[in-house]
Each structure stands twice: as structure tokens, then as C-alpha cells.
Amino acid sequence: MKKNISLILMGVGGVGRQLLQHIVSCRSLHAKQGIHLRVVGVSDSKSLVVASDAFTMELGDTFLMEVCRVKSDGASLSTISGCGESKVFTNSESTKKIIDVAAFLGKSTGLALVDCSASSETIPVLTQAVDLDCCIVMANKKPLTSTMEDYDKLISYPRRIRHESTVGAGLPVIASLNRILSSGDPVHRIIGSLSGTLGYVMSEVEDGKPLSQVVQSAKNLGYTEPDPRDDLSGMDVARKALILARLLGRCINLDDIKIESLYPEEMAPSVMSIEDFLGTGILSLDKDIQERVSKASLNGNVLRYVCVIDASRCQVGIQELPKDSPLGRLRGSDNVLEIYTRCYNDQPLVIQGAGAGNDTTAAGVLADIIDIQDLFP
Amino acid sequence: MKKNISLILMGVGGVGRQLLQHIVSCRSLHAKQGIHLRVVGVSDSKSLVVASDAFTMELGDTFLMEVCRVKSDGASLSTISGCGESKVFTNSESTKKIIDVAAFLGKSTGLALVDCSASSETIPVLTQAVDLDCCIVMANKKPLTSTMEDYDKLISYPRRIRHESTVGAGLPVIASLNRILSSGDPVHRIIGSLSGTLGYVMSEVEDGKPLSQVVQSAKNLGYTEPDPRDDLSGMDVARKALILARLLGRCINLDDIKIESLYPEEMAPSVMSIEDFLGTGILSLDKDIQERVSKASLNGNVLRYVCVIDASRCQVGIQELPKDSPLGRLRGSDNVLEIYTRCYNDQPLVIQGAGAGNDTTAAGVLADIIDIQDLFP
């Protein structure tokens, strides 16, 4: 007997688009496993397309591939002509429409809301869907790093939520931590390098290159956000740290995390243009970083931009670490997480691998969707 | 609403006993998660104790702790007096009784058979239970490394089987591979060091110590089986490799795996006593290993006892590997697995940590049990 997993996908940019491609290319694999992923709606920031009768109809693969084509051209969903048996809604109507479908499917054949956007605007629809017995799968970090009230609401039915790709893309970080937690093995400490960009930057400055030059190269290689300060601020790593800390049961907010930014406030985007930052501002930071690298080196250590979570701390920033440790040996843009528990006491459980990229992030989302299949009738 | 997960535990030696302790000590944690683990039966190689009415009654925590006490003294379950409202069956009656309970609970409130034994004798009861809608959780490698016929039978309902602790104790190896497979990310190659004992042995001989001395130390430290040849034969690693290869879809048997034994046939347990092997036999192997270590070292490499699974190979034995790779850097008794896929192509997904020990193995089994909770009503 085939099991249908109905989905609405919010966010069809990079990760969401890749997810649609994975879903279509895995059709025969999933059929062998007795599963069919039924995409009944997709949305971007401007519009929502929903099958005209979400109970009996789904968006066909030809249409989903057209969505991928349009989005890879950078256009809006609303520009797709010939949606066939589906309806298009504007952004202002979309929350209500998604909730309509959720109310309809959530308690009958089941529905998973899949959030591959990077927006806080999905929070209201996600929290409402939870009450309608829907499942939630997220690559979007914003909902889980909002207020504790939103967080508690989202995780009110822990079995119905998955969010592997909010921390290390497809790396099995959340899945592994959940296994550890459910077996009663207390987590004493987590330390990790969770930014491919900052991992690359720190291993390059270790080789003696000036920070300014490394950041410019990283930008040229497409490793950074359009404004590299979005990476250098540490805010993205802090969100990941917050998600991990809350998973461990810590009731804290983003404000409670000590975050070390790699640039001073007077070079913040609100004060200085990207051009000025990359052209002059960052040059004045080279010397300080190089001195810190040299000082660490004298102790046989290296600098890494890490998150540290233990009983007393949740902080992100540069730490001096032994050259000969999993984190110290890290080169390039891989992520590494060391987890210390009762079972992994002297030597941590280490998970390492690519922690960014649309392909692996979307693969993590897809694995999460398959993982909730037993909740569908 | 509380969800009851009913269990029969087969094998209450080291891992099984530890599992019972974990179950009892996690009572309040699981209650918070709305789960209750209901142990309705336990067995060792000689007897089975089952709650007298498995539908309404369970074995109480006081009794389970008494089981742990008796087993840690090395005694048999049958020596427990005062089983209260439970019944004791001899080994010859136990399969029939377990199937009775499975037929009764499997299709109603659900039942998981948990196999923490190290015996092939559980295969008939496991395969029958699968047809009775039961779930199966295994730390025992034997059933999954039996014939392909048994294997196919056991995995006929893949969602109802978990066996994390058959490969890397509690390390999230199977869980991670299942995520990769369900997201359609093809696994190109797996290479790993899956024996804590052989990991220790290979890193010690690398330091110049004679094999004979290292094996004796490992035995004294309690790292080896009573007869160290059980580790040195590579058979345990081959079973783990077979489980991984079959998970990847390879229809092969133990016979199809190329296994390098660290001792020659003329020193096999059927030919030579343990005393003769450790006293004289193994001394004659020191020179050859030391020469291989030196030769590898000249190439900047080290020797590791690994399993390699790719499109054309499934083999276990000594390989020369770069000193500066996750496997080459491995020291002591940690396990490491490198998984190469489309998403983890240049750099593998690496999972590393303690891969042996009753505590972590039982934690892996417990995480598996919690993971199947959605299949219980």
C-alpha cells in the first residue's frame, strides 16, 4: 500500500528549488519504499500556488520543474503561466489559504509544512499549523530562533517537527543529538565550527594570509553572503548555537548568547558601505587577527570560530584550540561538531562534513520528510 | 496521553542488562516525553520470564533490577525467586511463548522484540514476529549476517526494524546512512575502522611495539574477547561490513567478503590453544607486521584495519592509509567511518567516537526503541 505524504513548500529559492528537484528525481526510489511525496502547494515571498483541490489533486512534476526553471531565472512564481489545475494567491492571501489547506488535510490525510525560506514571516502560519495536527520540516533558522514563546509553540509536539538542515545542512547533527537525548545520555558540552565561511577564513589566516585578502577571496569564491559582514558578525552561527542550546533544554534567547563579531560596531552595515568596508575598513583589522594567530601558534594552538555550549555557557567566537584536535585540524569549509556526553566522555562523538550547499541542505530536508512518514496514515 | 511501548528483551547479559538499567533510570525522562517502556518479558539463553498477562501487566522495575543483579553475578534468570505475577519458561518453551505474546500484542497494542543476545538462535522467533506486525530492535549482529533469505525476511517492513548498535555501538552510523539513502544521495564508498580492539592494536604497533606485546596488553586491559583471535580474525568487522553493504542494497553473504585474518590458519583456535598462541604462535607474527608498518611509514602512511565497501569491493583487512586522514589520525579504540556520496564527495561525512562498551551500545538500542514510537498506537 502506498503512503502519501502531502506537502506545502514555503520558499522555492536555492534550497527549496533543489528540494523540488530531489523530490522529482527520487520518485522511483520512494515508490520502492512505498512512499509518494504529494506536493500540493509551493510559495515564494510574493505568491502561493496551490492545487485547486488539495484533497484529490497535487502539483504535477512538469509544473514543479517549471517552478524550478522560473526560480533559477530569478523570477517570481506569479510569472508562471499555465498552472493547470491550480490556483495562484498573492502574498496577503497566502497565510489564510495555507491554513485552510492545513485545517483540511492536517487532521485527515496529514500535511507537512516545509519551510525552506529564510524569513520570519512564516512563524504565524507554522505555529497555527501545529495546532491543526500538521508536521513541520524546516531549513529556515528564523522560527526556532525567535522568542521562547514561538519556540515552545513550534515544538509542542516534538515528534511532528524536524529541522536537521537548520544547523549543519544535511549533516546528521540534530538527528544524532535527539538519539543521545532520548537514550538519557546527558550532553555535557558541544563545541563546533558551524560556518563553512568562517571555517575557511580561519584556516586561511592561519596560513599567514591577511584577513582582508582572505575575506575578499571567500567573497570571490561565492563562499560569503553578498555582504560578507553577514558572515563575519557571527549572527548566523549564533542562531545555530541557539537552536542546539534550546534542543538541550536551555530556555534562552539570541540576546543571551555572547557573540564575538569579527568587525567593530563602527564598521557595521548601518554605518559603512560594503565598498568602504572591503576597501579600507577591514584592512585595519588585519594586524590584530595576525597577532592573535601568531600568539596562538606559540602555544601550539590555532584559532577557530566556534560555538560552545555547556552548563554555564552559550557563546560563539574565536577560540584558541589545540592544533591536534578535530576542530584544530579542520581545513576549508567543512563543519565539525564535537559532542561530549556520559557515553562520549574522554573522546567526543565527532560529526564532520560539508555543512553548506543547496544540494546537501535539501537532502537533509528530504531525509526529514521521509523520517516523519509513520505519522501519515 | 501516554504511549506504551511494549518490549520483550532477549539477552540480558552485558548490553541487555545495561539496557534494563537505562530503561529504569530514564522513567521520568520518558514520562515527560509521554512514553512508557513496558517490559513484558526478558530471556537469557536458558529461560524466559513473561508477565502472566502481557496485555495488562508488565515486569516491574524492582523485578528488572533483580534481573540485573542476578545477571551481573553471572547467574541464570531461572535462579530468580519471587517472580511475582510472572511466569518462567525453559529455553525449549520460550520461542513458542514469545510468538504467543507477539501474536497477541503485535496487531493490537504493538510489541517490539529487542535482541541483545549474541546468538543465531533468535532468528526463527525474529522472522516469525515480523509477520505478526512486531517491531524488531537489534544489537545482535548474527540475524542480519545470516542468509539473504533471513535478511530479506527481517527487513520486509523496513520501518519496523532498527539495528544501530550492530555496527558502531551507539554511534549514529545506521541512522545517518538511512537518512542519506532516503534522500536519494548515492553512497559511493564507505571506509571505516569498526573494531575498537583492532584500532587499538594498529595504533600501538605503529608506535613500534611488537604485535604480540600489544595483543597481550589489549587482553589485559579487557579490550579483547577471552580468545583474542576472535578479534584478530576480522570476522566481527566482516559482519559489520556485511550489514553496511546489505543496507546499501548489496545482495551478498559473509562468504563473499574478502577477510584478512591477522593470524594464519595453522594458529586457528581449532589447531592451537590460546596459551600456545599467546605464548609462542603470535611471536612469529611480530616481524612481518613490523616490516609492513615500517614500509608504510616510508610512504608517509600508517596501517589501519578497515572495512572498505564500494561498487566493486566489500573487504576487511589491513590498508595503508595517509597519516593525515581521519582514519590515519585515529588513535586508541575509537571507531571512525568515512562515507563518500554525491553530497559528500571530495570530503567525506565522518562519524567518529566510542564504538564499543555496554553503556553506549545499550544507549543506541534505547534510542532505536524510542525512534519507533510512532508505530505504537
Image (tube, coloured by chain):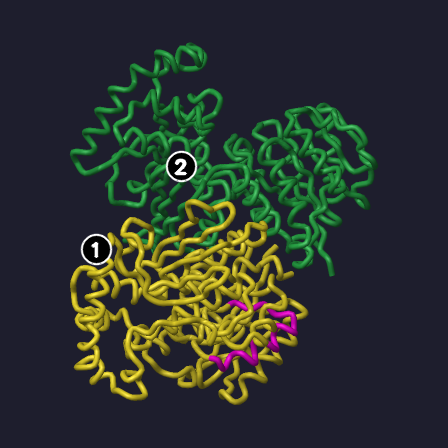
Chain colours: A green, B yellow
Mark 2 vs mark 1, CA separation in Å = 31 Å
Residue at position x 27%, y 33% in the image: A303
Viewer-side residue, A87 vs B76? A87
**Quarter of the image where the C terminus of chain A is located:** bottom right
Closer to us: A69 or A197? A69
Check disc 1: other Cα within 10 Å, few if <14, some if 14-19, many if 20+.
Answer: few
- Is residue B134 in the magenta section? yes
Same chain for mark 2 and mark 1? The answer is no
The part of the image, by quadrant, that contains residue B335 is bottom left
Q: Which residue is mark 1?
A: B298
Residue range (magenta) = B120-137
Inspect the image, locate mark 2, and give the three-letter code of the amino acid beneath it: Ser
Which one is closest to the eye, mark 2 or mark 1? 1
Q: Is residue A284 left or right of residue A31?
A: left
Q: In terms of image quadrants, where is residue A328?
A: top left
Q: Answer whether residue B361 is magenta in the image.
A: no
**Marker count (numbered):** 2
Q: Main secondary structure of the magenta part?
A: helix
Q: Is residue B145 left or right of residue B333?
A: right
Residue at 35% of width from left, 41% of height from top? A191
User: Residue A5 at what x, y percent from top left?
Assistant: 69, 49
Q: What residue did someone put label 2 on?
A: A333
- Secondary structure under tag 2 reads loop
